[in-house]
Image (cartoon, grey):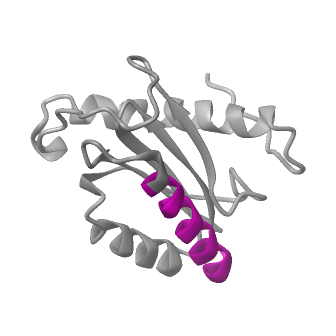
Amino acid sequence: MIYQLAYMSAARPGMPDAEVHDILRASTANNRRDGLSGMLLLVDGTFFQVLEGEKDKVEEAYRRIAKDARHSALLRVLERTRDERSFPDWTMGFEKVFHGDPGGDIMPVDAGDLTKNPNVELLRKQAPEILSFMRSLYASRNMRGAPELERRA
């Protein structure tokens, strides 16, 4: 079984794209070493990341991420086990989406403390839809072995 963890966090306001690319380079190397796969989505200064692999390795990566000062207010939104990986060929896929100004650097975001936000439960409920969106991005890249998207009843 594959353990899958998804979390959200606030990117440090004003973080330049170069730092995001540093995160991606380090994540790719660490994930390859630890047998993890996943995807990082950056939407208007908010990270949404899915990590998958052996549970102890995923949790170790999450603890390492929690100590990284480039983002804050980590919030687990999905934990589950699966028969297969959602991103089997990506040690760390990445997409950046802007709804506001598409400038190069991350725009400041008033994330506050996500754990105290009254919409947190709604965010958790939407996590499967966000994951489906990420899987569709993965499939659109014609990745070998891209799994079928889950059908909603």
Magenta stretch contains residue 22: yes
Between residue 144 and residue 111, name the one nearer to us: 111
User: Can you tell which quarter of the image residue 29 is in?
Assistant: bottom right
User: Can you tell which quarter of the image residue 51 is in?
Assistant: bottom right
Magenta stretch contains residue 151: no
Can you give x and y, in whole percent of width and height, for residue 55 in the image?
51, 74
Can you give x and y, in whole percent of width and height, for residue 42 in the image?
46, 39
Can you give x and y, in whole percent of width and height, for residue 104 in the image?
46, 34
Please tell me how many numbered marks the rendered image carries: 0
Residue at 34% in and 37% down: 45
Main SS type for the magenta part?
A: helix
Residue at 90% in and 50% down: 144
Can you give x and y, in whole percent of width and height, for residue 57 in the image?
52, 79
In which quadrant of the rendered image does the N terminus lie?
Answer: bottom right
Q: Which residues are magenta?
A: 19-35
Q: Is residue 144 above or below residue 149?
A: below
Q: Is residue 135 above or below residue 16?
A: above
User: Can you tell which quarter of the image residue 103 is in?
Assistant: top left
Residue at 60% in and 46% down: 94
In which quadrant of the rendered image does the C terminus lie?
Answer: top right
Q: Is residue 131 left or right of residue 144?
A: left
In the rendered image, the residue lying farthest to the top is 100
Q: Is residue 151 above or below residue 39?
A: above
